[in-house]
Amino acid sequence: MNAEKYKQVLQEIKPFHAQLIAVSKTKPVEDILEVYQAGQRLFGENKVQEMILKHEALPKDIQWHLIGHLQTNKVKIIAPFVSMIHSVDSFKLLQEINKQAEKNNRIIDCLLQIFVADEETKFGLSEEELFALLSSAEFSKLKNIRICGLMGMATNTDDENKIANEFSHLKKIFEEVKQKYFNNESSFKELSMGMSSDYKIALQHGATFIRVGSIIFGER
Ligand SMILES: *Cc1c(COP(=O)(O)O)cnc(C)c1O
């Protein structure tokens, strides 16, 4: 049962004061409604089209978090309603989010995705790219985006030490960025890390958002 697993996860994260994003990608609206009725309001999707359809079909007080790679040409279709974009991995994308947010007369909350894992296939900024982006004059001109923190994924491995090292590395980058660029901005406070296989490790290393799918909704 979806709702029971959901409540279990909520109990586990309670001591950590983190927020749960229920990752509902590939799952039907009935499954989402079950978890919604148990109280969940934050849902994560990795595909724009799917998020649009679910946004249309489901209650409007759901906060939709985009967690997957986003192409610039698709920003405009989610800009009117998306709650947060976790997967910002280039300045070009950030510029487009800013432009579409402006058109919709809103500010869109974003996280910068940082690459901390081993796999070459994963998206995200390197530390060097991150600091270059935040230091650039063009960045400071963007008024319709709000950088709320960082997001990252650990290497897909059974080696818990390795995962812990990657999360603690990301936490360290977060603290550095906070101090250097967002010291007076209380909205820079989120660290989105941890999925079904590694959220317990992520919580121990300072995650404020965990993105959990298969434990709640079952295998995809
Ligand atoms: C699918 C996905 C998750 C959730 O994965 P589970 O293993 O099902 O918990 C988390 N983050 C991202 C970026 C994802 O694409």
Image: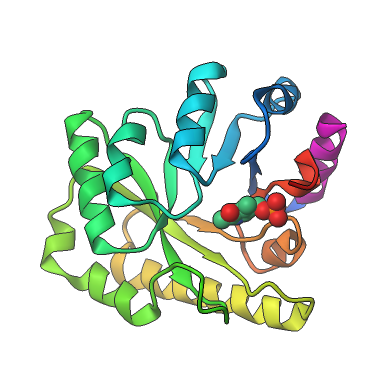
- How many callouts does the rendering have? 0
Q: Is residue 66 above or below residue 87?
A: above
Q: Residue at x 54, y 17 (%)?
A: 57
122 part of magenta stretch: no
Asked where in the image residue 133 lies, by quadrant, the reply is bottom left
| Residue 103 appears in the rendering | yes
Residue 102 in the image: state x and y as whole percent.
18, 36
Q: Is residue 154 above or below residue 182?
A: below
Q: Residue at x 32, y 42 (%)?
A: 74
Q: Quick one: quadrant of the N terminus?
A: top right
Residue 201 in the image: state x and y as whole percent.
73, 67
Residue 148 in the image: state x and y as whole percent.
40, 52
Q: Residue at x 62, y 71 (%)?
A: 154
Residue 182 in the image: state x and y as whole percent.
32, 62
Front one among 193 and 153: 153
Residue 98 appears left or right of 10? left
> What is the image's colouring?
rainbow
Front one among 199 and 90: 90
Asked where in the image residue 101 lies, by quadrant, the reply is top left
Q: Residue at x 49, y 52 (%)?
A: 68
Front one among 88 and 210: 88
Residue 3 appears left or right of 78? right
Front one among 142 and 178: 142
Q: Is residue 56 above or below residue 206?
A: above
Asked where in the image residue 127 lies, by quadrant, the reply is bottom left
Predominant SS of the magenta segment: helix
Magenta region, residue range: 1-14
| Residue 209 appears in the rendering | no
